[in-house]
Amino acid sequence: MARTQGSRADITGPLIRDAARRLFARHGFAAVSMRQIAAEVGVQVGTIYGYTSDKQALLADLMRAHMERLLADWQDDPSAPATERLERFVRFHIDTSLDRADDVFLSYMELRNLDPENHAEIAGLRRRYEGALQAILEDGAAAGAMQLGDARLATMALIAMLTGVTNWYREGGRLDRAALYRHYGALVRGAVGA
């Protein structure tokens, strides 16, 4: 379907993705229609199909873009001590969770709404990111700097805990980010026996 005359792909496409991200995060994927997304952007519903084949593809594209950006942004230095790497991961994950809360929500809560092919792809990207933390924990245990029973289980528990800041943290509240880093850093170190 052709785009509406006068529409700009470089503007309309990102507006559609931003509106879908917001609406999916606020109301849940299943509760949002393409018509609602179109209304949010101020375009006809048919316009959206010039940018995506369907709602499922739109969700998968949003999740893929988030996970690929997350993987590209995370920079680990395997030559650094595992405890320093862990501290950097804690800060990175907290910042990402707070700065991209809607993306984080979709990537963790809406996997269930992906078809099997998209689910496998996004879950694979998620496992790669989780693997970055797991490698830090395994390196820390191997060096004797951390005490772990099960690195995979610890990885999943820590990511869930760190992602949970999106449920309660508000900028300008009682704690600033520096305090979050300190408190969560201490919790994480305690959890892994560092």
Image (cartoon, helix red, strand yellow):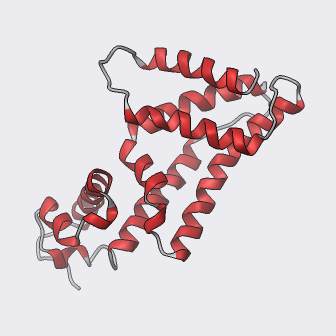
The structure residue drawn at horizontal position 13% and vertical position 76%, both measured from the top left corner, is: 4
Q: Is residue 56 above or below residue 130?
A: below
Q: Is residue 178 above or below residue 146?
A: above
Q: Is residue 119 left or right of residue 82?
A: left
Q: Is residue 143 left or right of residue 71?
A: right
Q: Position of residue 180 (x, y in %)?
A: 48, 20
Quadrant of res 191? top right
Q: Position of residue 189 (x, y in %)?
A: 68, 22
* Residue 98 visible in the picture: no
Q: Is residue 86 above or below residue 186?
A: below
Q: Is residue 155 left or right of residue 90?
A: right
The structure residue drawn at horizontal position 32% and vertical position 52%, both measured from the top left corner, is: 25
Picture quarter with the N terminus: bottom left
The structure residue drawn at horizontal position 47% and vertical position 65%, both measured from the top left corner, is: 112
Number of callouts: 0
Q: Residue lying at the far bottom in this picture: please name it.
A: 1
Q: Camera-side residue: 111 or 135?
A: 111
Q: Camera-side residue: 194 or 57?
A: 194
Quadrant of res 92? top right
Q: Position of residue 10 (x, y in %)?
A: 27, 62
Q: Position of residue 75 (x, y in %)?
A: 63, 38
Picture quarter with the C terminus: top right
The structure residue drawn at horizontal position 31% and vertical position 18%, both measured from the top left corner, is: 173
* Residue 72 visible in the picture: yes
Quadrant of res 59? bottom left
Q: Is residue 39 above or below residue 176?
A: below
